[in-house]
Image (cartoon, rainbow, N blue to C red):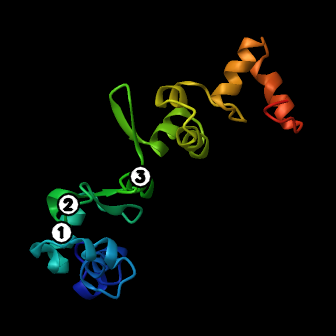
Amino acid sequence: IANMPYSDKRKQRIYTTWKNMIRRCYNKDHTSYKYYGGKGITVCAEWQEFEPFYEWAIGSGYSDNLTIDRIDNNDSYKPQNCRWVTPKEQANNRSTNRCITFNGEVKTVAEWADGLGISFQSLDARLRSGNWSVEEAISIPSQRYDLPKELLEEAEKLGLERQFVIDRMKHGWSIEK
């Protein structure tokens, strides 16, 4: 698209990306304005025009399957704070994500779950329950049915296999029973 006339570039996804970035930051009627312009996020002077943004984008790895991402969510749209990432990578860079530190490594709950091969829902439930430490939630292998830590400890004291307890739970037995 580099050699395309300007009017044709406006029909490309990259132009829509640029236009939406501008709108989020400056159009008070835009549905996302409160998260961008309303929080003081702006677009650098250089990118107020499409061509300089376009040149930066193409030189920085733009592809139609990537999205623009601000490295520091508290900073504005500018070359040194933006990159092109997959939607999954962008989702892990949201300011609303819960980050967990384990063995000195900081990741979102989704990144930990993905790396551990367990569902986000299972790991998130473990962490939110208050019954699991971060170390336990991350290091204890996930089963099809996550069980409360206390139940696992009690079962172990009684010499009951984890699968035995899971099978009973599948058949409707209460935790107490």
State left or right for residue 51 relative to residue 19.
left
* Residue nearest the viewer, comparing 82 with 13: 82
Residue 87 placement (x, y as % from top left): 43, 58
Which secondary structure lies at badge 2?
Answer: helix
Callout 1 environment at 10 Å: few (<14), some (14 to 19), or many (20+)?
Answer: few
Are dots 2 and 1 in contact, CB under 8 Å? yes
Callout 2 environment at 10 Å: few (<14), some (14 to 19), or many (20+)?
Answer: few
* Residue found 68% across the figure and 35% down from its top: 146
* Residue found 63% across the figure and 27% down from its top: 149
Give the vertical position of 94 relative to 110 (above or below).
below
Give the vertical position of 43 relative to 152 (above or below).
below
Which secondary structure lies at badge 3?
Answer: loop
How far is the residue under mark 2 from the one under mark 1? 6 Å
Q: Quadrant of the C terminus?
A: top right
How far is the residue under mark 3 from the one under mark 1? 31 Å
Report the amino acid beneath label 3.
Asn
State left or right for residue 72 relative to residue 32.
left
Instruction: Give the label on residue 59, or none.
Output: 2
Instruction: Give the label on residue 97, or none.
Output: 3
How far is the residue under mark 2 from the one under mark 3? 30 Å
Camera-near label (3 vs 1) is: 3
Callout 3 environment at 10 Å: few (<14), some (14 to 19), or many (20+)?
Answer: few
Instruction: Give the label on residue 55, or none.
Output: 1
Instruction: Give the label on residue 174, or none.
Output: none
Residue 22 placement (x, y as % from top left): 25, 79
State left or right for residue 98 relative to residue 55.
right
